[in-house]
Amino acid sequence: MDRDALNYIIQEVEKLKVDTKYNFDYGVPGALTIDYYTQNIHFIFVVQGTADGSNEEQYLKCKSLFDYHGVLNGTKMNWIFVSSNPQLSKYSNVLIFDQYFESMIRTFEHGKWDTNPLFNNVSNVNNKTHRFLCYGGVPRSHRIIFLSKLVDSGIVDLGLVSFHRHLEKHEYIEICEKNNFSDKFIHYLSNGPYKINDDEYTLEKTLNYMNPIWDEYLSPNPSHIQKVYFNVSLETSFYEPHLFITEKTYKFLPCIPTIVVGQKGVLSRVKDLGFKTFPMMFDESYDEIEDGDSRMNFIFNEVKKLCEMDEEQLNDLYLSCRENIDYNLKLIKGDL
């Protein structure tokens, strides 16, 4: 009966894994491989939330499984839910582990970042050819909406902007009809994808976390950074309630002023991790705006304001961020 209970839990977790709403791995603590571990009568079962963040519903679903079926040889199983979502820290058996933040630290430890001589020039205002950097990556609704604002306002050409995936005709028609996008933007979108010369790494490479390219993916591209004044981070999540932050934000904080098109509370979270942000360049009250559309408009207006700003004034703002950038770099390198 106990072994049946164990098999039942494994089967149920497997079902959750193939359901996009509940994407889990389970495994040995530390390794987080797809496996389970027994020693004598002691049993440890680790459930890892989806790489794109986990929410309370996912945790409670697992808790229900273990509450009703989590007994092995008469002993209740020990289990841990691993998540990058700090909102789940109120539960005693949740381990908060931010894989993107931890992986980025490892890239510093491996000497992957500031060894590149191009980093010596990132603060030189004479190298600036564009106002901002914006990696579009995989099409998501909030990224497409933000890109539409850049295009319709005419400031898209002031940035180094990428949008990797070419949308199928039915995809962009559906998205555009839903959001009532302009003909100008529909034309722009249909002519994608857009890349920045020696652009970011390909999706096929970056999705393999065990690939050495993953270290490169977590490193900023200095040839892009030295050409711009600030970065617009188009995060993975925006409208979702569970907080999730990726390398799209983390990897830029130690090298360039960054504004985040992300969820409410992103800046608060990175400050909790020790980072300094850039209130001298951006009005960061956007981080407290609950409504997604209002937050989106506020962030865009900040970007637009900087794009319309006198170059000398923008130079001064950029240089005023240098102290915080240096601090963040020392934080990641453990030099504070």
Image (cartoon, helix red, strand yellow):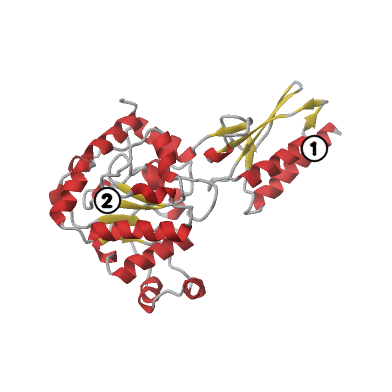
Question: Which residue carries the number 1 mark?
Answer: 68
Q: Residue at x 68, y 48 (%)?
A: 16
Dot placed on the residue nearer the N-terminal end, 2 or 1: 1
Is the N terminus in the top left, top right, bottom left or bottom right quadrant? top right
Using the image, determine if residue 34 lies above or below residue 194: above
Q: Position of residue 193 (x, y in %)?
A: 38, 66
Outermost residue, top direction?
40
Spatial CA span between label 2 and label 1:
51 Å
Location of residue 253 with respect to 71 vertically, above or below: below
Viewer-side residue, 77 vs 30: 77
Position of 57 relative to 144 (above/below): above
Q: Where is residue 163 drawn, in percent x and y?
A: 38, 62
* Mark 2: secondary structure: strand
Residue at image mark 2:
230
The answer to whether residue 193 of the structure is visible from this angle is no
Residue furthest out toward the right: 1
Q: Residue furthest bottom?
A: 183
Position of residue 197 measured from the top left corner of the image (x, y, whole percent): 28, 59
